[in-house]
Image (tube, grey):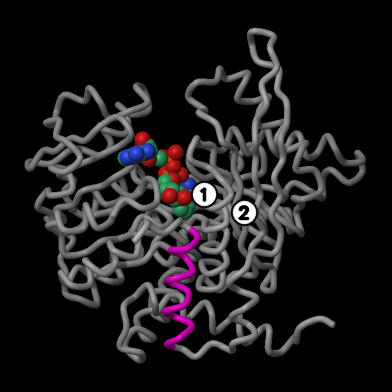
Amino acid sequence: MSRLSVFETVLVQFDKAADLMELDPEIRKILSHTTNEIVVNFPVVMDNGCVRMFTGYRVQHNNVLGPYKGGLRFHPQVDLDEVRALAAWMTWKTALAGIPYGGAKGGIDVRPWELSPRELERVTRRFTFALGSNIGPEYDIPAPDMNTNPQIMAWILDTYLQMMPPMERNRAVHVVTGKPVESGGSVGRNKATGQGLVFVLEAWAKDHGFELQGATYIIQGFGNVGSWAARLLKPLGAILVGVEDHSGALVNPEGIDPDDMAAWVEREGRIQGYAKAEPVDHETFFGTQADFFIPAALEEQITAETAPLLKVGVVIEGANGPTDVDGDRIMLEKGIHVLPDVLANAGGVIVSYFEWLQNKRSEFWDLDEVDARLHRQIVGAYCSVRDIAKEYQTDWRTAAYIVALRRLEQTYKKRGIFP
Ligand code: NAD
């Protein structure tokens, strides 16, 4: 059988939950499709004076619960299928988190590391211009994802505001979230996805008598999500014994200091060359003995090839879609517990929602308030998933989908289908 595309994987996960919960067949038809798919080709003048064409995407999956919401990814793997999948996952994630958003995602097919900072800025601004009124503060709100960051969000904001009449500009600052704090961002947004993941893991550990103090783990991806998760796990006593990123993998059974590694990556842009751990190949990294694994890079990493190698008891998905259908089946057979992406990495979009609310109300919340609200919201979602998994005697991914799909179904049933 040929390998499923990423969006096909989403549909397999969706169908499993929809069958189990007996989702209304008419609503099922709607939710298995995206709503809008925007593809833009745009020119950018490069530093050498030549024009280069770029292709950007924005897929809006569903907005029955509120404005479309989801990140922008700059990566050569970005294509329509991947963006569709990521947009659908956002619909389930926002519904599960109980925040008033729909799901969207976007990105550019580009190798950002090959661009100069000025080229990156021009590509970002020109993409924002090309998207035009397809995004908006009450309509579709982008945020950071792989290879995009607060600086890029600030350029998007600035470009979007330039396209508006001057008297409207101050009312549109919430067109994008994940902004630098100086440009209307929220404190706590940068670490939010890692923080949410740690809150979910702590809740799970408490329920399962699992001791985080002294527990060992490996992490794939040491960017925003991975590095923050590791840094926040350090004070809880968990020990990082293996890391992989795009440049290779490193292990050290004695432990790798996450702050030291983060400082290295900040300086070097990769884990490669870090001297206080041993380089290993991809297979050895996946076979590292540890208590848990945090995938926090790309999708389709835990597969028929890699899942059999895993020697961990729990997987907490920081990345979106790191596990394909075979990976899920094999982990289930091996008794590996999976805390699924739509739950475990929801902290980012939850704090994005807080940023959006603060912008709308001209308020500034302090870090204690942001963290306390994030904790309440994500642990609430955790409890719903746990309870539904028990009620339906199913895995947690399917349970997370059921919680989300129930909310979407109830909303459609009340509102009806136009006309
Ligand atoms: P990032 O760009 O900050 O970091 C990505 C990391 O993945 C880097 O360390 C990179 O080296 C690594 N990587 C890339 N290709 C790899 C490969 N082939 N093998 C191993 N490692 C590889 O991105 P991020 O924002 O941390 O996002 C990581 C994942 O988390 C993505 O799936 C993203 O969709 C998801 N996510 C991010 C957020 C957020 O707030 N940033 C929120 C929810 C989910």
CA separation in Å, label 2 and label 1: 8 Å
Mark 2 residue crowding within 10 angstroms, few (<14) / some (14–19) / many (20+): many
Q: Does mark 1 have its CB less than 8 Å from ligand 1?
A: no
Quadrant placement of the C terminus:
bottom right
> Would you place residue 88 above or below residue 27 in this image?
above
Residue 400 falls within the magenta-colored stretch? no
Q: Residue at 16% of width from left, 64% of height from top?
A: 313
Q: Position of residue 39 (x, y in %)?
A: 69, 45
Residue 259 shows up from this direction: yes
In the picture shown, does residue 269 fall above or below 403? above
x then y, percent, for residue 223:
39, 39
Q: Nearer the viewer, residue 32 or 288?
A: 32
Residue under pointer 1? 189
Answer with the quadrant where ligand 1 appears in the image: top left
**Residue 403 placement, left or right of 266:** right
Q: Residue at x 59, y 48 (%)?
A: 143
Residue type for callout 2 = Glu
Mark 2 touches mark 1? (CB < 8 Å): yes
Magenta-drawn stretch contains 16: yes
Residue furthest top as drawn: 48
The residue sitting at 69% across, 64% down in the picture is 35
Residue in the picture at 18% in, 35% down: 250
Judging depth in this view, the residue of 225 and 337 nearest the camera is: 337
Query: Which stretch did the figure color magenta?
Result: 7-20
Say which of 299 and 72 sits in front. 299
The N terminus - image quarter? bottom left
Give amino acid for label 1.
Answer: Arg
Q: Which residue is mark 2?
A: 355
Count of labels in the image: 2
**At numbered mark 1, what does the secondary structure look like: helix, strand or loop?**
loop
